[in-house]
Amino acid sequence: MINENASLLEEIYQATKMGLEATQLIIPKVQNPQLRTEIEDHALRYQDMGAKAKQMLHTDGRMPKPEKTMQKAMLRGSIQINTMMNQTPSHIAKLMINGTAMGIKDITKNLNRLDGADTEVKKLAEDYIINEQKNIDELKKHL
């Protein structure tokens, strides 16, 4: 039987690492000060939530798995290609919204699949989803 707490925490940790990576790759391309500040705030929230997931894994005697190198390379390439010709606030907001929506979908799927996880772990997943929805709401202003 799988450890549902560890599995859900790992999914949250990996999602926050990907979100953080995406924000760090996008920030240098953002010229709009308000959008830049919002994305920098998103990065801080990813760091905070990732640290919580990592701490909870440590408390359970586990270490987070290494980042998925191929997924990270694909993210990097996708951002480079998608911002090469268009760095408008609207386009960057759209890219960030699409990535954020994928994070919501993945964590929601895992939250449903791993329904035996402890309440505290589920709450972190729910907080992740709420945070991501907040990020989308902020980004929509730039479309």
Image: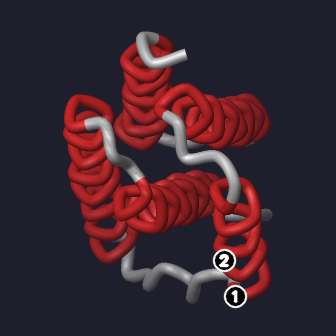
Residue nearer the viewer, 6 or 85: 85
Q: What residue type is labelled 2?
A: Lys
Q: In this view, does 40 lie to the left or right of 96?
A: left
Is 2 above or below relative to 115?
below
Quadrant into which the N terminus falls: bottom right
Q: Which amino acid does label 1 sit on?
A: Thr
Instruction: Kindly check if marks 1 and 2 are in contact, taking CB atoms under 8 A apart as contact.
Output: yes
Task: Report the disc number at residue 69.
Answer: 1
Image-quadrant location for residue 24: bottom left
Residue 121 in sight here = yes
Label 2 element class:
helix
Residue holding disc 2: 72
Cα distance, mark 1 to mark 2?
A: 5 Å
Count the numbered circles shown. 2
- Residue drawn at x 48%, y 79% as measured from the top left: 64
Is 17 above or below relative to 106?
below
Residue 116 in sight here = no
Task: Report the disc number at residue 84.
Answer: none
Quadrant into which the C terminus falls: top right
Estimate the x, y position of residue 126 in percent, counting from the top left. 46, 27
Is 57 above or below relative to 122?
below
Image-quadrant location for residue 96: top right
- Residue drawn at x 30%, y 36% as measured from the top left: 32
Estimate the x, y position of residue 48 in percent, counting from the top left. 22, 54
Q: In this view, does 130 lie to the left or right of 88?
A: left
